[in-house]
Amino acid sequence: MDNTSYIALSRQTAVWRQLDITANNLANTNTPGFKGEQPLFVEYVRRTQNTDRAFDDKLSFVQDFGIVRDLREGPITHTGNSLDIALNGE
C-alpha cells in the first residue's frame, strides 16, 4: 500500500472507533452508574518535500491512543427503598 492509503485508513479507523464509543454511550445512557467514554486520538500534520504542486505540501496521520472515561460523580437519586444506599464525596 502507498502512504495515502495508510493515512486514509488511520483516519477511518479512528472515526470507526469514535462511532463505537458514541453508540455505547447512547445505549447505556439510562443505566445506573454508567460512566461515559470519549475517544482519545491525535492528528499529526507534517510538511512534505513534494515537488509536484498538484498535491498539498502537508501530510496528516491520525493515531488512536485509547479511551478516556468520565469519572465525575452523578446525581444522587432517592429511590424510596430503605435498603438502597448512596455514597457522596471522595
Image (cartoon, rainbow, N blue to C red):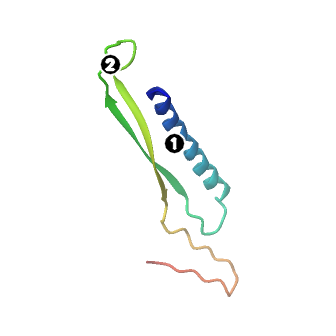
User: Is 22 situated above or below 15?
Assistant: below
Viewer-closest of 58 and 5: 5
- Amino acid, disc 2: Asn
The x, y position of residue 8, in whole percent, is 50, 31
Residue at 40% across, 32% down: 60
Q: Quadrant of residue 42?
A: top left
Query: Above or below — where is 16 with respect to 51?
Result: below
- Give the tally of numbered discs: 2
Q: Helix, strand, or loop for circle 1?
A: helix
Q: Which residue is mark 2?
A: 50
Crowding near the residue tagged with mark 1, few <14, some 14–19, many ≥20 C-alpha atoms within 10 Å: many
Q: Which residue is mark 1?
A: 14
Q: Is residue 41 left or right of residue 9?
A: left
Give amino acid for label 1. Answer: Ala
Estimate the x, y position of residue 36 in percent, counting from the top left. 55, 59
Residue under the image location 70 percent in, 83 percent down: 81
Residue positioned 31% across, 14% down in the render: 51
Q: Quadrant of the C terminus?
A: bottom left
Residue that sits furthest to the right in the current view: 81
For the residue pair 30 and 18, the one nearer the viewer reads as 18
Say above or below: 7 vs 38.
Answer: above
Relative to 74, 54 lies left or right: left
